[in-house]
Image (cartoon, rainbow, N blue to C red):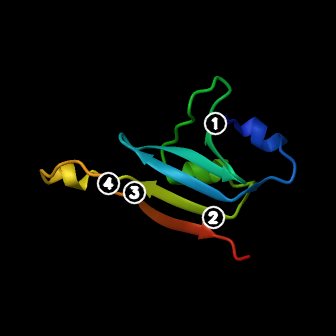
Amino acid sequence: MRITLEELRDTKDLVVDLLEILSLEGQQYMARLVIGDQTLLLSDAGGKTALFRSAWQIQDTLGSFNILETQVVHPSAYHEMVGMAPADIEPMRIRIQRQRQ
């Protein structure tokens, strides 16, 4: 599912359980938000995924929201880069922020 900044702003008592900053090829990033039992992609009003130039830009954009944890998620193509067959490898996750509860 998708959500816009405007929809986030209009949600009362919003708590984002997890903000995942997904690293994409071409030095672009997108935001995936876990709110309760929903996983949502941050999108523009036209339904296209919002793309950012840095993890900092996403954090600045969403800085006014109550976000419990933030992770940068970076998929690895290591196997393919060293000539091995592609494999299902969990992406690298780097926690960059977490509120104490």
Disc 4 crowd rating (10 Å Cα; few below 14, some 14-19, many 20+) is some
Q: CA distance from mark 1 to mark 3?
A: 21 Å
Residue appearing at x 53%, y 61% in the figure: 71
Q: Residue furthest top?
A: 46
Q: Looking at the picture, how far across and down is residue 17, in whole percent?
A: 68, 59
* First reached walking from the N terminus: tag 3 or tag 2: 2
Identify the element where label 3 is drawn.
loop
Q: For mark 3, what is the residue? A: 91
N-terminal-most mark, 3 or 4:
4
**Residue indicated by mark 2:** 69
Amino acid on which the number 4 mark rests in the picture: Ser
* Dot label at residue 44: none
Q: How far is disc 3 from disc 2 in space, using C-alphas?
A: 17 Å
Mark 1 vs mark 4, foreground winner is 1
Mark 1 or mark 4: name the one nearer the start of the chain.
Answer: 1
Neighbours of disc 2 within 10 Å: few (<14), some (14-19), many (20+): some
Q: Which residue is mark 1?
A: 1
